Image: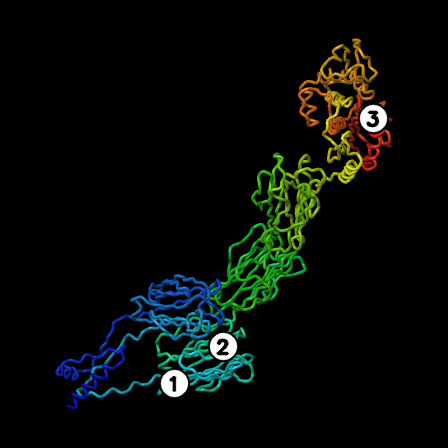
Amino acid sequence: MKKIIFLALTCLVFLIAPSSVNAINIEESDTLESSQQENPQETNFTDTEEKHVNLDFSMLVGTEWTSSLNEEDIIAGMKASLFDNALEKSSKGITYTLTTIDGTILKASDGEEILFPKQSLKNITFSLSEEYSNDYSINYRVYSDDNVWSEWTKDGLTAEKSKNATYIKKIEVSLEEKTATYSQTTPTTTETEVPSEPAKAPSISYESHVKDIGWQSPVKDGELSGTTGKKLRMEALKIRLEHTELTGGISYRAHVKDIGWQSYVSDGALAGTTGKKLQIEAIQIKLTGELSDQYDVYYQVHSAQFGWLDWAKNDKIAGTTGFSLDMQALRIKLVGKNEPAPGATTTPMITAPKLNYQTHIQTIGWQNPVTSGTISGTTGKKLQIEGLKINLTHPDLTGGISYRSHIKDIGWQQYVSDGLLSGTTGKKLQVEALQIKLTGQLAEKFDVYYQVHSANFGWLDWAKNDQLAGTTGFTFSIQAVRIKLVVKGSTAPGTTKKPAIKAPKLSTQAHISNIGWQAADTSGKIIGTTGKRLPIEGLKFNVPNSDLNGSIQYNSHIKNIGWQGFVANGALSGTTGRSLQIEAIQIRLTGELQKYYDIYYRTHVQSFGWLGWTKNGEKAGTSAFGYRMEAIEVRLVQKGKYAPSLSKSYQQNDYSEKLKKVQDLLNRKYNSRDLGIYVMPTNGLGSASINPNTEFVAASTGKLPGIYYTQKKINSGAMKLNQPLLYTPQVNNFRGAYSPEGAGIMPKYANYQFYSVQTALKNTIQYSDNVGANFLGYYSANQYDRTFLNEINSITGRNWSSWTLRASAKQNALLIQAIYKLGGVANQYLQNTVYDDQRIPKYLPVKVGHKIGDVDSYRHDVAIVYAKKPYILSIMTKNYVSYETISVISRDIYAIMK
């Protein structure tokens, strides 16, 4: 009976044993007795081969993937993958799914990235494929924005943000190997004893002394002691073991600011300091005695700047050295020998890397290496750096340092690493810009900052992590450099706004009549048109995305408006939709743009064509002519570089203000229907007038076309001054011929005598000779044929198909202007007539070349007044306006125009 009781009790024990332990099958009693009488046999309940798999999990913070976060970091992405050590390659078998606050579900697997907006993550699950789920569990928990960690969950269950939180800030994940193998020894006799209670696993308890808080309550077995996200240093700690039946204990020591490594203490004694405000920076923990034979002690620290480092084990250093970074939190856990670590163990400690670099200097050669943050090179000596080497010693982290140079005449070289030469030696080629970057774990834990001293600019701001430092497009050498390694996320060693300066590019754009806006151009092309008579109506200039401060400013002179005023940086100068042409322009730079650059420009203008180059705010174009600007060319030129030669860029009508006063005079005093008055410079640029287009009976001013045409033929050689002309009746009998009975000294009737061209021309001008004019009309103008009429029409702007003795003040002014431009004897004769004591010349103290005309009630005079700057005055009258009135008008105008 006793035997049966013990057997039943044994069955009960196995039935209520934990599910991870396999129960022994009980056979028939005689079979069992037979079995128990034999030697004990080991029964293995699984033949699954042990797998060795690592988890690689990282989160996206900003633009960088990392596995450890600071308290303030917020993730915006995640990825996870498995690495099978036995196969030595990544293995498929992990899936992860998340839900965002708006209900979006995202799913990925095996290293695929999941990206989501910051502050949007609601929950997360991880699961393993069947290939791995039999042997491993994946454990995970989340940290919410109310600074609360969730409970650990695993294997496809959901880890959710805390109830009062808005979103998940970060995630912690670990891969844990299951206990899959169990061996059981069968009883050896029928007298089976009741199994004894298994030995209770030891527990580890620890507490921290924290800045501003003091001693915290003890925590146990992997729980967090200390703080995160509050920037509070840990100053002391105590560690003790509980519930252990094994011999041995726990020893530990701290690396303390200003002290270094302390001696080991044990079993609840204080490591560190209190009351001295000294931070712990690293720790070592170890087990002794039987405990060290059966257990490993793992510990993990949260370090300022780096956040949670990986787990250390059995007296390895956890924390940092060489940084003066405080330890802020701690986790400690006992793990059975040969059982998986509670998390990643790659980087439990970070020792400050050692950085040094050296430069090769023009005329000096290689300088000695310097350490982090020290100047290498020279300043104030105008010596260029030609080569560079950078070394980085880093015992705890993978990766290295890579760098490349932008070289004069070469451009960007390829990246080199770890002490190799970047740049050149012996070629006298300057380094103009640098890029430096970290790789591997170094890039995850550190930022590399670098700063260059550039010719002409001096020290630029600090660049970071492969940003460009220096200049491009200027041919300015780097003369000195500083490089510094900074813990990821730490404050930069200085300002970082402008580490590099690229040569600016000028953008130009024109609005053209009948075309509209042309496309903006940055290649330096001419904008506008030539040969199409199309005015520019609007302009925009800009220096987009310039690394140099300052602006480009420009001011347009607009038809009917005048100077508009300066605008800047892409604003419209001019008008659109109003048909108002731009006639002149000013362009200038400000700020650093002005310091390092000149702005050159020239304009293509109606009648003038291309004017000369000017620069930096000077005027280009025309003023007071009413001439359209048709095209413009603008260049941004670095100071000291090749630039266009400057020449006359601006044509101003010197009579502009005077003509305004003349116009005011005419409007006030001579605004009569009996008068036609036209005043203009001999170059025709500008005018003042009263009734300029009213046609009058031309009288003898109608002889001007014949005078012009004859002088032109003399100039071309088609006629000669001594050429004889026969006086026949036909000379006075063609359409448009003057009556021979009128003014003049030549015979009134044909006498079949020869008269020279010079005689006919001189008498026509000096005596207003009608017969002389008929000689010119008959022989020179071919009886006013079509060719002659076309020539005169092109000068006067009229469209006569037959000769008519009518003219306006403006037409006569244009005819005498044409004669003035021809020069020759005609201009001499005009200055010496029998009418020089009347009309226009009467009161003027300067020479006057003129042609009068009288018939019936019409009295006219048109003249070239040889003032300091000659001008043309044409006066036409009717209704018996007196000669004196013409003389007074001439005197009043001269008083202004002289």
Mark nearer the N terminus (1 vs 3): 1
Question: What type is the residue that disc 2 sits on?
Answer: Gln
- Mark drawn on residue 289: 1
Mark nearer the N terminus (2 vs 3): 2
Quadrant in which the C terminus appears: top right
Q: Furthest residue to the left? A: 30
How many residues crowd mark 3 within 10 Å: few (<14), some (14–19), many (20+)?
Answer: many
Which type of secondary structure does the marked residue at label 3 adopt? loop
Question: What type is the residue that disc 3 sits on?
Answer: Gln
- Mark drawn on residue 551: none
When the figure is inspected, residue 458 is found, relative to residue 617, above or below; the finding is below
Which type of secondary structure does the marked residue at label 1 adopt? helix
Question: What type is the residue that disc 1 sits on?
Answer: Gly
| Residue beneath disc 2 | 328
Badges 2 and 3: C-beta atoms under 8 Å apart? no
Separation of disc 2 and disc 3 at Cα? 107 Å
Residue located 54% across and 64% down the image = 448
